[in-house]
Image (tube, rainbow, N blue to C red):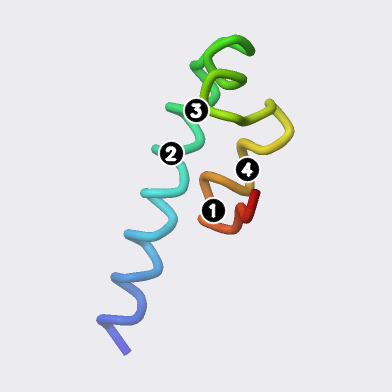
Amino acid sequence: MLMTLIRAIQAFRDYQRNLAELSRLSDRELADIGLDRSDIQRVAAGAYHG
């Protein structure tokens, strides 16, 4: 039970870090890696299948 909670907290922190890093990129930089600003949340969550 405790390990499940720890993993959930770590996953949330990873999501927040990924979201922040991707959000700092310019539209041009996102386009260079094949992303659009609307993709950021899905990519940060690991749910992007583009």
Point out which mark residue 18 bears. 2
Quadrant where the N terminus lies?
Answer: bottom left
Label 3 neighbour load within 10 Å: few <14, some 14-19, many 20+: some
Residue hosting label 3: 22
Q: Residue at x 51, y 36 (%)?
A: 19
The reply to whether dot 2 and dot 1 touch (C-beta < 8 Å) is no
Label 4 neighbour load within 10 Å: few <14, some 14-19, many 20+: some
Q: Which of marks 1 and 3 is nearer the N terminus?
A: 3
Q: Which residue is drawn at 62% across and 55% down?
A: 49
Kind of element beneath mark 1: helix
The reply to whether dot 1 and dot 4 touch (C-beta < 8 Å) is yes
The reply to whether dot 3 and dot 4 touch (C-beta < 8 Å) is no
Could you give the CA–CA distance between mark 1 and mark 3, rounded to whole angstroms? 12 Å
Could you give the CA–CA distance between mark 1 and mark 4, rounded to whole angstroms? 6 Å
Residue hosting label 1: 45
Could you give the CA–CA distance between mark 3 and mark 2, rounded to whole angstroms? 6 Å
Q: Which residue is drawn at 52% across and 45% down?
A: 44
Q: What residue type is labelled 2?
A: Asn
User: Residue 41: image x %, image y %?
Assistant: 63, 43
Could you give the CA–CA distance between mark 4 and mark 2, rounded to whole angstroms? 9 Å
Point out which mark residue 41 bears. 4
The reply to whether dot 3 and dot 2 touch (C-beta < 8 Å) is yes
Q: What residue type is labelled 4?
A: Gln
Q: Which amino acid does label 1 sit on?
A: Ala
